[in-house]
Amino acid sequence: MRRLHVLALLSLGSIPLTPIAAHHGWAWATGEEFELAGIVKSVRHGNPHGEMQLRATSGEWTVEIGQPWRNAQAGLTAQMLRPGTRLLIHGHRSAKSGERLMKAERIVIAGKSYNLYPDRPS
Amino acid sequence: MLGAIETARPIVALKDSYLAYPLVNTAHIIGIALLFGAIVPLDLRLIGWRSQSEPVDQLSRILLPLAIAGLLIAVPAGLLLFATDARAYAAAPLFQAKMILIALAIANALALRRFGWSGSEPNRPVAFAGAASILLWLGAITCGRLLGYIE
């Protein structure tokens, strides 16, 4: 009987963990899908995560792209994201009003999609 | 010079790695955990907590080497992490604050060793040094963690 109680508590306790784990790293962004088109001004690849400056019509944006592993599994190379490249970024923007910062879920280059987070809708 | 460090082959490899970087990050955390975990019991004892317990120098014999071991793990790992983005870290006020706090914490520890207790029971200056030690290491850890959240 006691073992059943412990099992029940453990399984109930693990329920809230799933949404938290899925939301890791996205808490600072809004929940809505957002897209931004622009030209790469500069980019830094590498850990802890890559970051690029994108020149869009609304101004200059900072776009968080993946860590080396994530970019690679999406099929992206540094060469594909070099300055001067025109791209369309799907992702989530900062929840802070007016802040030109977003996190990329999917990057479209010359009509081809590269998905950084295949298990997230974008 | 910092730019040269950043572009060194092994540092670029670390920056672009899949597993090495997070492992170095982990080593940095383990070193910090060991350092802080060992020094806090000793510092509390210096402040006077559970003073009926074993003599300070006996506690120190066990805890101080472990704290130093923690530092010897955290520092090289930290230097490697720093190197991957040397210019940006060096320019960041939070990073500069962290370095100052670490320097003060080490200086405090050395002063304690030199002028503090010689095996006999601690006194007021020693207790203050113990308190300062906890606050300085807490500050360094906080600055280090905040680096990931505040530009």
Image (cartoon, coloured by chain):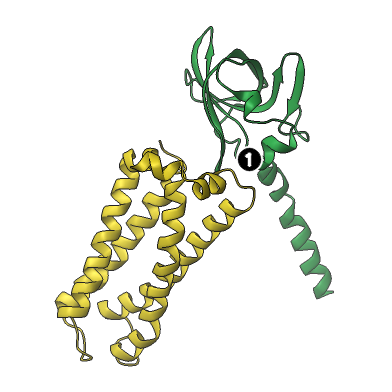
Chain colours: A green, B yellow
Looking at the image, residue B102 sits to the left or right of residue A115; the answer is: left
Numbered circles on residues, count: 1
| Coordinates of residue B126 in the picture (x, y in percent) | 19, 77
Q: Is residue B54 above or below residue A96?
A: below
Q: Is residue B63 above or below residue B40?
A: below
> Secondary structure under badge 1?
helix
- The residue located at (85%, 74%) in the rendering is A1
| Coordinates of residue A67 in the picture (x, y in percent) | 61, 39
- The residue located at (52%, 44%) in the rendering is B12
Q: Which residue is mark 1?
A: A68
Q: Is residue A19 above or below residue A12?
A: above
Q: Is residue B68 above or below residue A33?
A: below
Q: In which quarter of the view is residue B91 placed?
A: top left
Quarter of the figure that contains the N terminus of chain B:
top left
| Coordinates of residue A73 in the picture (x, y in percent) | 74, 38
Quarter of the figure that contains the C terminus of chain B:
top left
Looking at the image, residue B138 sits to the left or right of residue A122; the answer is: left
Can residue A31 be seen in this snapshot?
Answer: no
Single out the residue that lies furthest toward the top.
Answer: A57
- The residue located at (70%, 17%) in the rendering is A109
Q: In which quarter of the view is residue B16 placed?
A: top right
Looking at the image, residue B42 sits to the left or right of residue B114; the answer is: right
Q: Which of B122/B9 is in front?
A: B9
Q: In which quarter of the view is residue B140 placed?
A: bottom left
| Coordinates of residue B76 in the picture (x, y in percent) | 43, 61
Looking at the image, residue B65 sits to the left or right of residue A54; the answer is: left
Q: Residues within 10 Å of mark 1 (few under 14, many from 20)?
A: many
